């Protein structure tokens, strides 16, 4: 049985009505996480922040998706378990607007090989 590993980065940045491609992340970086997610498993994170934030998930290999909830501590790909998600092939970017006090973040590693 082949196991896929994925190294991912989560960048949390503060933003004020800007486009993600225009942000110089070094000027606004609030937090940075790096880790390994095994195939078809979730890794969970928690953030507490009152202002606008931009969450960026970059996979070094493979494809990881991100699921975010403001009430469920363990969001999954089940539609009822998350409020926001990004599941593209490539970099995931999610903007969370002011007013959300805390967010539970789940990262799922997909393995297609």
Image (cartoon, rainbow, N blue to C red):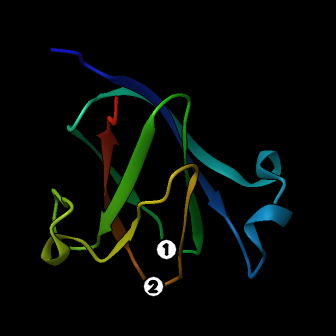
Image coordinates of residue 74 in percent, x first then y, are: 15, 56
- Examine the image and state in which quarter residue 84 appears: bottom left
Q: Are marks 1 and 2 in contact (CB under 8 Å)?
A: yes
Residue 95, given in percent of the width and then of the height, sits at 56, 72
Nearer-N-terminus badge (1/2): 1
**Horizontal and vertical percent position of residue 109:** 32, 39
User: Could you say which disc has been placed on residue 95 in the image?
Assistant: none
Helix, strand or loop at mark 1? loop
Is 44 situated left or right of 21 in this image?
A: left
Circle 1 residue: 50
Front residue of 8/72: it is 8
The foreground one among 30 and 67 is 67
Give the residue drawn at x 38%, y 74%: 101
Q: Residue at x 41, y 60 (%)?
A: 87
Instruction: Classify 49 as above or below 64.
Output: below
Residue at 26% of width from left, 31% of height from top? 39
Using residue 86 as the reference point, say whether residue 20 is left or right of it.
right
The vertical placement of 68 against 99, above or below, is above
Q: Percent x, y for residue 104? A: 29, 60
Identify the residue shown where x is 24% and y is 71%. Answer: 82
Q: Which mark is residue 99?
A: 2
């Amino acid at each position: 049985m082949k196991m896929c590993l994925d190294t991912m980065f989560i960048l949390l940045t503060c933003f004020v009505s800007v486009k993600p491609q225009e942000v110089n992340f070094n000027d606004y970086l609030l937090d940075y996480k790096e880790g390994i997610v095994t195939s078809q498993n979730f890794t969970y994170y928690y953030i507490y922040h009152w202002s606008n934030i931009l969450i960026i998930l970059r996979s070094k290999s493979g494809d990881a998706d991100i699921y975010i909830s403001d009430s469920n501590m363990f969001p999954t790909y089940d539609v009822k378990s998350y409020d926001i998600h990004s599941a593209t092939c490539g970099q995931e970017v999610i903007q969370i607007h002011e007013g959300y006090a805390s967010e539970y973040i789940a990262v799922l590693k997909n393995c297609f090989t």
